[in-house]
Amino acid sequence: MYTFEYRWVLVLLPLPILIWLLLPRYKEEQTSVRIPFFDRVATAAGLKPAPGAIVPRTNWLQKILGPICWVFVVVALARPVFVEPPIQKIQPARDLMLALDISQSMETPDFISPEGKRITRIAAVKRVVDSFIEHRTGDRIGLIVFGAAAYPQAPFTLDHKTCRDLLNETQAGMAGPQTMIGDAIGLAIKEFEHSEAQERVLILLTDGNDTGSRMPPVKAAEIAKDKGIRIHTVAIGNPKATGEDKVDVPLMRSISGTTGGQFFLGQDQQQLAQIYSTLDRITPKNYKTQSYRPKRQLFMYPLGAAVVLLLAYQLVMFVWVEVRGLLARRSSREARAEAPKLSHA
């Protein structure tokens, strides 16, 4: 769409006509003798008139080009622009971090797939979380994996495909056999430091209990609360197991309760899928859509056209004056050549 940024400038278009109609004509009185045969008198006297005496003060070309150039200049001052089609940009309002336990115990094959096959915990988690990420359009998503230590697998990004690819490459045991829940929360807090999102959510999934984090999980949850981070916890281990294989349900409840999140316990893939479906529902998509239309400036075209016309006019008039001067000199030479012949006759 073509438009003008300063449309009010277009009111100057009739200004020359108003000046011509309203202002008095310029008059200058001077003593002079007007003769209709000025060129012949000058030639007979052997004088070379100045260019201004040969070329009229105004001509038809000036009367045509003057208004055209004025229109071009006024249009350029009005700043014509071409407005491109609108471009929409999604501005995420929530940053969502997924912290997944990939300790050695996640290789336990005690989950049943929808096809009825027995699969490992990590395989079931990857299937469900992959589907969850796929449906979270509009949210920036990050991924942390933890075992004996916590590692950032993917920073906050809108490139969900890459995040899913990194998730699918993750294998149980890559981060060691232990489960550092507190360190995983601490790393998530650090990842959220540069987040400007209105909502900050951490979904923490584990099948065990904390086995010696440098930062106690409860203390990490309190810091997360102070930072405005809500933590939802998902426990998929066996609460009745013993030792490191026992999932610490009271700790998971305490972490989520401290930050205003929810706790979930999943014993198979169907329950796990329902948990993430619930998480998808209680954390609805939240994003802002910004729309803007790029503008392409066009003022240089009418301005350039005015300059080209003026330069072309000056060139044409220069050539015209030179040609008229050359013809006048040739006529003068011919007249002087004919004068002796007439005197002898």
Image (cartoon, helix red, strand yellow):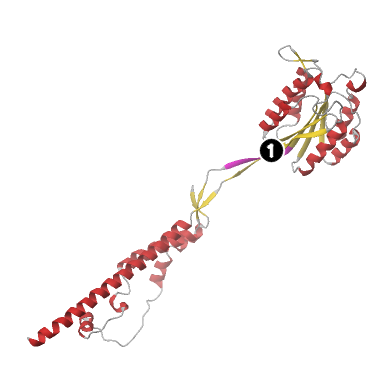
| Part of the protein shown in magenta | 87-94
User: Residue 105: x percent and y percent?
Assistant: 84, 21
Q: Is residue 123 above or below residue 41?
A: above
Nearer to us in this view, 235 or 199: 235
User: Residue 131: x percent and y percent?
Assistant: 70, 25
Q: Is residue 59 above or below residue 76?
A: below
Q: Is residue 298 above or below residue 320?
A: above
User: Residue 31: x percent and y percent?
Assistant: 31, 88
Magenta span: predominant SS is strand
Q: Name which quarter of the figure residue 320 lies in.
A: bottom left
The extreme right residue here reads 243
Q: Name which quarter of the figure residue 41 lies in.
A: bottom left
Q: At 52% across and 46% down in the image, what residue appears?
A: 84
The extreme top residue here reads 116
Q: Is residue 71 left or right of residue 272?
A: left
Query: Element type at marker 1?
Result: strand
Nearer to us in this view, 11 or 42: 42
User: Residue 22: x percent and y percent?
Assistant: 40, 72
The amino acid on which the numbered mark 1 sits, given as a three-letter code, is Tyr
Q: At 70% across and 33% down in the image, what residue appears?
A: 285
Q: Name which quarter of the figure residue 345 lies in.
A: bottom left
Residue highlighted by disc 1: 287
